[in-house]
Structure formats: structure tokens, C-alpha cells
Image (cartoon, rainbow, N blue to C red):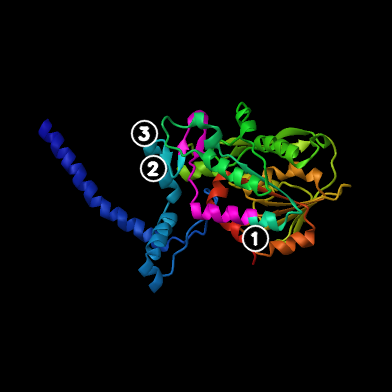
Amino acid sequence: KMKKKTKSYKYFFRNMGLLFPFFLIIVFLISIFMPERSFSEKENRVLASKPDATVSSLISGQFEKKYDTYVNDQFPLRDMWVELKAGADFLMGKTRSNGVYLGKDGYLLEDFTPPVPEHLNATTEAMTSFAKAHSDIAQYALIAPNAVNILKDKLPAAAPVKDQNVYMDELFSTLEQNGISCIDVRNTFRQNTNHQLYYHTDHHWTTQAAYFAYKDAASKMGLDTSVCSYEQFPVTGSFQGTLSAKSGFRSHEKEDIYVFLPKSDTPAHVVNYVDEQKKTASFYAVEQLNVRDKYAMFFNGNHPLVRISTPIKEDRTLLVLKDSYANCMIPFLAPHYRNIIMVDPRYYYDDLEELIQVENVQEILYLYNANTFFSDTSLEMTLSPQ
């Protein structure tokens, strides 16, 4: 019997060894004939395209790095392999995949990567220099903590996560010393963890969290929150976020997205997507609920420049320099300003100084989540003189 078992194992592994080269050939052929994908709807990001081989890129090693990224992004049936890997990792007891932790109570939590000191210093210096150059404009910064910060109790045991608060404390101190008022929502969030502040499968905060942040912002910015009260309504129960796609964990879990709508009539808003030359009377693009990236229902995703006009008596104009966290909070700010100018520095390449003059901006709000703020370099380029 032992001999038969040994022969069976040898037969199995020999056949597997013979089949493996055929598998590689099949994958290679599929990769040749399969069209290149430019965007992953599941991961909600642009995929790497095939890099050009130049002498300088070959010498510097950049071509090899870019080609590795290209192969990873364009690998045949990539989404399926990500899910299979996550399943195998789970069976082996692993709780981290592609920078995402498999947390408790159904939460996926994105890891925090400490900022590159040179990049953070450049961004901070650009903000403080900009504040000094525009000392007549009230300036505020709301850098929202991520789930990995507020929901530490949901992390797997002994997860080696860096403390985001160290960097946030230092940032807020520097900004405050240079005339930028910081809106620190961390204590409010910690006191309200009985509410769902973050999605289970996505990196964004929920509309409930954005509402708490709005209340904190209002006290700093001199806004009367009694002008409007809200009621929650679910708009979808089939949201599946980018952390699920990125990690492969909880790949079949769906969750709700809520919006807060005014209980009473409010002035009609006009939302102008400037570059797209499109106007609408709603903050919400309900058609996005039919695609995977359902969070894009807030202002139809991210745009270089959006102008919101509200016919109220008080003539106040707010410039918001932002990332996607702002999209579900801006509707709370709209009733307080005749004009809100939303600029996403990741896509905006025009002259910000000219925009401030033309729009007669009186207040500026930096509204980011900490992970994006500490990793992105576009804000520094937007604020620097062109």
C-alpha cells in the first residue's frame, strides 16, 4: 500500500510538472491577444500601460519597475487571481493583502504609510507660504483620520500599523502656527464609534461621519447649523468598495450608502462642472448607483473644478481644495455660502491665484483624508506660483 501511495504521489507531481509549462504558455498567449485595459472598474483606478523602452529608462532601471507594474496590472483574469490569493491567504491565517487588513466585525482597514519627509515638508511649506501670501483670506484645514486610526480595535491582533496621530499632531501644530485654523475631528469620531463612521469595504468615511465633521467645522468657521436639519435615506444596499477589490477579502459583501436630505425646503443649488460644461440642480448623480463605483454618486466623482451657486442673502465664497472625502460633506456646507468653488489638485492645472481673484474668494478649506494628504504631492504644485 505504501508503495502504491508513493507511486501515486510521484505520478501526480510528474503530471503537474508537465502541465505547468502548458499553463504558462496559455497565460502568455492570452496576454498577447487580450486587449489592454486602461481602467479597473472593480478597483476604481487607472491601470498601468506598457512603458516605452528608452536608453535612459533602461539605464536608470525605471523601465523594469514600470514594466513590472504593467505586467501586474494587465495580468490575464487579474481580478479572479486576486480573489483566489486572498482566499488562500485567509486559509493560511493571513490577515493582510495589498495593504489592506481583514478586520473584525466585517471591516477592511487600509494600512497607513508614513509620508516621505521631503514631500510632506514641501506640501506643508506650500500651504504656510500660501497662507502668508493671502493673510486676508480665512483659511482652515480638515484632515480626516482614516479607519485604521479611529477603529484600531477592529484591527487583527498585533497588526504592525504605524500611528497616524503622530504625523497629524505635527501637521496641525505647524499649520496653526502659520495662520491656518485646523479642524480636528478625531475626538468627535472617537466619541461616536457607536455610529458607522467608515464603510466596511471601502476607504471612504460615511455620510454620517461627514455630518459629524461638518458640525465640528461649523463651530470653527462660524456657521449656524440650525439653518438646516437633515434626515437619513438609504440610496443603495449593494455598495462594494475599493478595499474589497484591492485585497480580495469580503469579495461578496454588500453594504448601504446613505444620504442626508434637508427636512425642509432649501434654496435651489446650481452645480456647474466647469471643464465638462455641464450644469445640474443636484449634488447627486443617481446614475452612478448602477455601476460599481457607487460612491461616485456624490458629485459624480472627482473633477478638476466644480462651482456651486446658492441664492442666499449672505455673499460668502468658499474655495475647497479637496480629495474625494469632501464629496459627501460639501452638501452640508452649501446652504451657508452663495458660492463654493471645489478644486481637486490632482486634476487641476490652471492658475489658482487667478481663480481666487476672479471668484472673490473669502475663505479656503483644505478637506482631505489623512492617507491621501500624506501621500499626494499635487497640492504643493497647485499652491506654488506657476
Does the residue at mark 2 contact the one at mark 3 (Cβ under 8 Å)? no
Q: Position of residue 213 (x, y in %)?
A: 68, 37
Q: Nearer the viewer, mark 2 or mark 1?
A: 1
Q: Which type of secondary structure does the marked residue at label 1 adopt?
A: loop
Residue farthest to the top, as pictured: 194
Dot label at residue 348: 1
Badge 2: residue crowd in 10 Å (few <14, some 14–19, many ≥20): some
**Magenta span:** 101-128
Find numbered disc 2 in the image and state the secondary structure of the residue it sits on: helix
Residue located 49% across and 59% down the image: 37
Which circle, 1 or 3, is nearer the viewer?
1
Q: CA distance from mark 1 to mark 3?
A: 44 Å
- Sooner in the amino-acid sequence: mark 2 or mark 3: 2
Query: What amino acid type should be assigned to the residue bearing mark 1?
Result: Tyr
**Is 35 rendered above or below residue 210?**
below
Residue topped by disc 2: 85
Q: Residue furthest front?
A: 177
Mark 3 = which residue?
91
Q: Amino acid at mark 2?
A: Lys
Asked which secondary structure carries label 3, the reply is: helix
Q: CA distance from mark 2 to mark 1?
A: 37 Å
Q: Nearer the viewer, residue 110 or 237?
A: 110
Q: Nearer the viewer, residue 331 or 319?
A: 319
Which callout, 1 or 3, points at the residue further toward the start of the chain? 3
Whether residue 119 appears in this view of the structure is yes
The quarter of the picture where the C terminus appears is bottom right
Q: How far across and how far down the image is residue 376, in percent? A: 55, 53
**Horizontal and vertical percent for residue 210?**
67, 38
- Residue at 51% in and 42% down: 243
* Mark 3 Cα-neighbour bin, 10 Å: few <14, some 14–19, many ≥20: few
Q: Amino acid at mark 3?
A: Leu
Q: Earlier in the sequence, mark 2 or mark 1?
A: 2
